Amino acid sequence: MNLTELKTRVEQGENLHTELKQWPVHPDDLAAGIVALANTDGGQIFVGVDNNGQIVGIDQNERDRISQAIDNVARNNIAPPVTVIQETIIDEQGRLVLVVHIPKGDQRPYRTNRGIHYVRTTSGRQRASREELLRLFQATRSLYYDETPIVRSSAITDLELQAREDLLRLARGRGVDVDNIEPERLLHNWRLLREVNGESHLTLAGVLFLSRNPQYFLPTAGVSALRIPGTEIANAPLDQKRIEGRILNIFEDTLRFLYIHLPRPHRIQGMEPEVHAEFPPEVLREILINALAHRDYTMSALIRVIVYDDRLEVRSPGLLPNSVKLESLGYGMHMLRNPIIYNMLLRIGLVTDAGSGIPRIIRLTRQATGLEPIFKLEGNEFVVALPRRNNGNGSQQ
């Protein structure tokens, strides 16, 4: 980093990647700052800059001692330890700033020696909430949220036997051997059930596939389906449904909503009319099952499916799983946030294990409409948008 870059950063003030410190700094405060950056996206702590963004510098005679103190905090006051890189920059007035580079940690979540986890926000640092901690564990694949037991549930009273039989029937139809093992043991093997203190409980995935009332345990595990005239979310919806139930019911009911609001004109070919869907059914099925399989269930938000005049949007809570980039989606990147849910959908034939979903959406949409699907991140949502060639009432533009 050079002096121009330093001045630009400190003038911008504290943000997601920047923290300003005037020496001396209490070890607990410094540890909290390092933890927050390592748990989030990495960044820099500028030592020798006050809270107003003014360079005040550090004593050059104390530089080595201060640098050693920072290394000691990163090594001894944080678990697991964080390796930081330091450099010094001197401005035109001879004031020395120590820049501490903190990487995005690959052993997240980090905590201070007081046992506190911090994360960085655009306005500073804060203690990590339970949901943020779960996302940190998921990001490093040390915990998958969909296999956590829902201890308020009971395998005896909350498991719908017909749902279990339907699931086994679907798996059997795909060639999965389900007849040579006792059903409850099979559900434990599939991690739809887990034992806690001698009692069997539904996991989060188990609730989604087997519970009598999944939304009792997971109120936002559903879909908000809307038909909105025009092209703006601010317009009042013509139709709006909150779709709930088990994951397979949500999938089927959301498809029905789309079939109602996406016109399927008839074309006469010979003696019989043929139905031509606006989007191939495979595309609609793929984007919906992807949303249900890959959404972030730690977030208290519904999947949103919105039919506008000019596009269909499917908005899933949560950003892309760790290491997956937008630009790599078209190449079939295959990184699972919810492997228990995904593997269950694989057993019943609703997904493949090839990472081919997104490339298939792109190819089939191009073939059917001549237009490109759009993949983007907005806020804390992953958005798939399919441009429409008609104006929303069935007539072609």
Image (tube, rainbow, N blue to C red):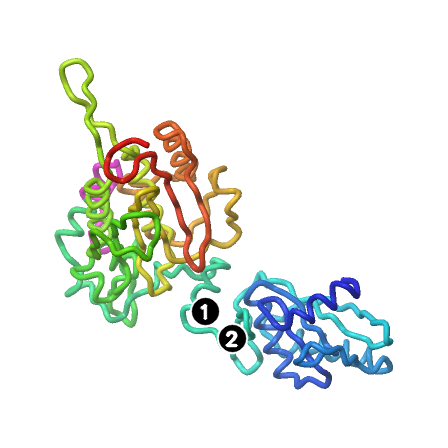
Badge 2: few (under 14), some or many (20 or more) residues near its Cα, within 10 Å? many
Amino acid under disc 2: His
Instruction: Compare residues 223 and 294 and report the one nearer the observer.
Output: 223
Cα–Cα gap, marks 2 and 1: 8 Å
- Report the quarter where the N terminus lies: bottom right
- In the rendered structure, the answer to whether residue 112 lies left or right of residue 332 reads right
- List x then y, in percent, for residue 21: 68, 79
The segment highlighted magenta reads: 169-186
Say what secondary structure mark 1 lies in. helix
Name the residue that disc number 2 marks.
117
Vertical arrangement, residue 120 with respect to residue 160, above or below: below
- In the rendered structure, the answer to whether residue 375 lies left or right of residue 267 reads right
Q: Quadrant of residue 360?
A: top left
- List x then y, in percent, for residue 375: 44, 45
Say what secondary structure mark 2 lies in. loop
Name the residue located 34 percent from the left edge and 63 percent from the top edge: 148
Vertical arrangement, residue 357 with respect to residue 270, above or below: below
Name the residue that disc number 1 marks.
133
- Evaluate if marks 2 and 1 touch, with contact meaning CB atoms under 8 Å apart: yes
Q: Residue lying farthest top?
A: 270
Amino acid under disc 1: Leu
Asked if residue 168 is among those painted magenta in the image, a careful observer would answer no
- List x then y, in percent, for residue 342: 35, 48
Asked if residue 178 is among those painted magenta in the image, a careful observer would answer yes
Vertical arrangement, residue 118 with respect to residue 180, above or below: below
